[in-house]
Amino acid sequence: MSKRKLPNEKNSDEKKAKTTHWSLGLLETIKDPKNLIQEDSYTYVIADKFPKAKYHYLVISKQEISSISKVTINNLDLLRHMEKVAKKIVQDVQSKEEEKYNFKIGYHAQPSMARLHLHVISDDMNSACLKTKKHWNSFTTNFFIPSENIIESLEKNKTIQLPSDQQCKNLLMKDLICNKCIYVPKHLGDLKKHILEHLKK
Ligand code: AMP
Ligand code: ZN
């Protein structure tokens, strides 16, 4: 990524969000250096506080972009850099771990937390923090948009098209299905037991 000085873009959405405190949780977390796994000129990396899989990290933009919906062609270098950071994290984990986990790197179509952040998450989806259908669907349906797709879209079309509000609602409320086979559970509890079988393989 080029070493240009980041513009001091005071994003009005982030300012607005100051009235809804919980949505600023990531910004609170990055204030404490103990929470930073790593940092460079453009990003912070933290562990997700409520991980939805064995490994779940967030690459957070230092530039004050509130959300993926505010990203433009001008942010292409930043997004490429965030993806590079994410891929390096995956490499590091995979080189240290005996069990090999597959990872997904992407953005939620409608993030709940302020400041642009990229999820880096192993695909086991085995976590006590994964408690709802929405949690499951937010990482296993098209609500989760691979970083590569966002970058490709900006490169080809100079813009990104995110799912509509209604499409997002539908994706989050979709019937549950295993992310690794065709198993259709009745309840999330059944699915949480079922995914343990995939870990044994
Ligand atoms: P998103 O839906 O893309 O906005 O995801 C936000 C992520 O931030 C979720 O995976 C949460 O588990 C995680 N999270 C929420 N609050 C905090 C916090 N205070 N520190 C770190 N991660 C958090
Ligand atoms: Zn399965």
Image (cartoon, grey):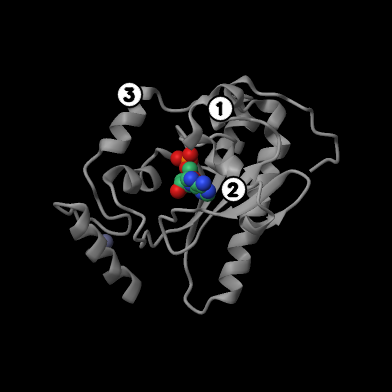
Q: Which residue is mark 2?
A: 29
Query: Does the residue at mark 3 contact the one at mark 1 (Cβ under 8 Å)?
Result: no
Q: CA distance from mark 1 to mark 2?
A: 15 Å
Mark 2 lies within 8 Å of ligand 1 (Cβ measured):
yes
> Which residue lies at the image location 62% right of the left edge and 60% below the top edge?
89
Q: CA distance from mark 3 to mark 1?
A: 26 Å
* One can see residue 145 in this view: no
How busy is the neighbourhood of tag 3: few (under 14 within 10 Å), some, or many (20 plus)? few
Where residue 2 appears, as percent x and y from the top left, is: 83, 40
How busy is the neighbourhood of tag 2: few (under 14 within 10 Å), some, or many (20 plus)? some
Q: Amino acid at mark 1?
A: Lys
Single out the residue that lies furthest toward the bottom.
98
Is residue 50 depicted above or below 108 in this figure? Answer: below
Q: Amino acid at mark 2?
A: Thr
Where residue 160 appears, as percent x and y from the top left, is: 55, 27
Going by the image, does 160 lie left or right of 129? right
> Which residue lies at the image location 62% right of the left edge and 44% below the top edge?
60
Of callouts 3 and 2, the N-terminal one: 2
Q: Mark 3 or 1, which is nearer the eye?
A: 1
> Which residue lies at the image location 67% right of the left edge and 27% below the top edge?
73
Q: Which residue is mark 1?
A: 18
Q: Which residue is mark 3?
A: 166
Going by the image, does 55 lie left or right of 29? left
Mark 3 lies within 8 Å of ligand 1 (Cβ measured):
no
> Which residue lies at the image location 66% right of the left edge and 46% below the top edge?
31
Q: Amino acid at mark 3?
A: Gln
